[in-house]
Amino acid sequence: MEKITDSSGNVFNDLGFKPEESARYTLRAELMSSLRKTIREHEWTQEKAAKVLNISQYRVSDLTRGKWEKFSLDMLITLAIRTGKQIEITIV
């Protein structure tokens, strides 16, 4: 019989990551998701996104395919700012 466990609401916590790792991974995942959404909403080609983000088309491909391990938190913040986003961090 399968055991089903309720989620805490954070997949990284549920997978057993330390709180500080979970926080970093969550921020990276949210930033990457936001960037991918921006690219889709603007209907940018990879070439156009590369120009806006000032990165190579190869890096845009990594971004759109969700290869989050290839992007640091700092880099994702930089890319989000390059799309015109404002970054806010709330500490609770």
Image: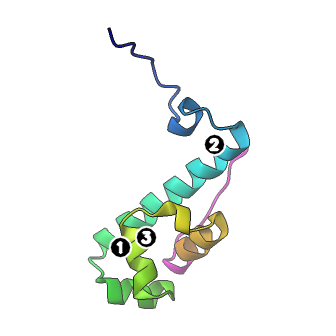
Quadrant of the image containing the N terminus? top left
Q: Which residue is mark 3?
A: 63
Residue sitting at x 45%, y 19%: 6
The answer to whether 39 is drawn above or below residue 11 in the figure is below
| Magenta residues, start to end | 82-92
Q: Is residue 84 magenta?
A: yes
Name which of mark 1 and mark 3 comes first in the sequence.
1
Q: Where residue 56 appears, x then y in whole percent?
A: 46, 88
Q: Residues within 10 Å of mark 3 (few under 14, many from 20)?
A: many
Circle 1 Cα neighbour tier, 10 Å, few/some/many (<14 / 14–19 / ≥20):
some
Residue receiving disc 2: 22
Q: Amino acid at mark 2?
A: Ser
Give how far apart the Cα atoms at labels 1 and 2 are.
Answer: 26 Å
Image quarter of the C terminus: top right
Magenta region, main secondary structure: loop
Q: Do the CB atoms of the residues marked 1 and 3 lie less than 8 Å apart?
A: yes
The CA span between labels 2 and 3 is 20 Å
Residue 69 placement (x, y as % from top left): 54, 62
Instruction: Identify whether 8 is placed above or below 24.
Output: above
Identify the mark nearer the N-term, 2 or 3. 2
Residue 92 shows in the view: no
Residue 52: where, in percent of width, then height? 45, 87
User: Could you say which is closer to the camera, residue 35 or residue 25?
Assistant: 25
User: Which residue is tagged 1?
Assistant: 39
Q: Amino acid at mark 3?
A: Leu
